[in-house]
Image (tube, grey):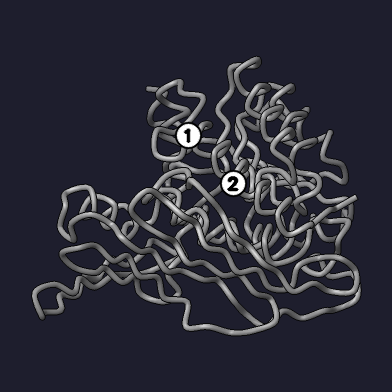
Amino acid sequence: MRNLDKIKWGIVGLGNIANQFAADLVLLEDADLVAVASRNIFKANEFAQKYSCSKTYDSYDALFADDQVEIVYIATPHDSHAELAIKALEHGKHVLCEKPMALSYEDSLRMIEASKKHNRFFMEAFWTRFIPTVREVLEKVDGGIIGDIKSVKADFAFYGNEIEGGRLFDKNLGGGALFDIGVYPLFLSYILLGIPKEIVAKSIFHKNGIDLQTSMILQYENAQAVLQASIVSDSDMKAAISGNKGRIELNAPWYIADGYSIFKDGKEENFSLPNLGKGYTHEAIECHQCIRNNQIESTLWSHENSLDLSKIVEEIKNKIGLSFT
């Protein structure tokens, strides 16, 4: 039966996040990493050997042309996501594309249109959406356990290493706090409260024009989200969702939480929900299920969800005066 077959993966862009994803992918019995591509063939060979992958390529186009590959995981720098995702879709591949899916809303639209045109599954790799903690917390919130949400507080911050050739501080590669990590707290606010009525945002900039730190307040009809992203400071990386009947806190670091706590009626209740591997496994499982069901998008993180978030990020980019040109 087709459902028992392994889904055959290819990976393009073999940096740190690709290593973490590949390490998780090998934990899934129905996943098979069959090809990897890097513009540096030595890097590709080393990566392939590490994860028992049989084929390596020194060009992304060559991997896209490989008939054995069913789905491509795109883990290149942000600036190339749109071009590579569309090219993979044109070659008949399903695509899981690292976040942010693109550096502009216009490019995000083109990627979704390509998915529809070629009838291939496409998903932005928002792994946090699929981890057990987030799925259960959303169910609890929807069930009214903390009442109506009034406040969401979340941040993502760390001390970035400004090294020569590093992607994080490179304007040409879409570096900076907002696009690299700011999308995480914005994602949490969006899945809980939807599209805001108004956004206030302020940033501290590097001399090269990227944002080093961005703080955001998202205004909703009856709630607010206070969010921050920084690559020049640290934080406890907890997330709090407060309602008129209680509060939920996601364990730190919240974007890959292994549990959560509910504070209600003067009591604290703790829940433990470990991830499989680091947590990338859960988004891969979702990809498998969608492909086997002939879906071109996930119901948990849909095309519309990605486009909504892209539009929110673009509004903030414009408000703070960030430009990658």
Count neighbours of disc 1 (C-alpha within 10 A) and say few if under 14, some if 14 to 19, many if 20 or more.
some
Judged from the image, the secondary structure of the residue bearing numbered disc 1 is loop
Above-or-below relation of 92 to 315: above
Residue name at image x 57 percent, y 64 percent: 216
Left or right of residue 140, residue 68 in this image = right
Looking at this view, is 8 or 293 the one in front? 293
Q: Quadrant of the N terminus?
A: top left
Disc 2 marks a residue whose amino acid type is Ile
Residues tagged 1 and 2 counted as in contact (Cβ below 8 A) = no
Looking at this view, is 187 or 225 the one in front? 225
Mark drawn on residue 25: none
Looking at this view, is 218 or 257 the one in front? 218
- The residue that label 2 is drawn on is 312
Give the mark nearest the N terminus, 1 or 2: 1
Residue name at image x 79 percent, y 57 percent: 322
The image shows residue 263 at horizontal and vertical percentages of: 18, 74
Left or right of residue 122, residue 260 in this image = left
The quarter of the displayed image where residue 124 is located: top right
The image shows residue 190 at horizontal and vertical percentages of: 45, 49
Q: How far apart in space, not on screen, are marks 1 and 2 (Cα)?
A: 16 Å
Looking at this view, is 221 or 233 the one in front? 221
Above-or-below relation of 188 to 230: above
- The residue that label 1 is drawn on is 302
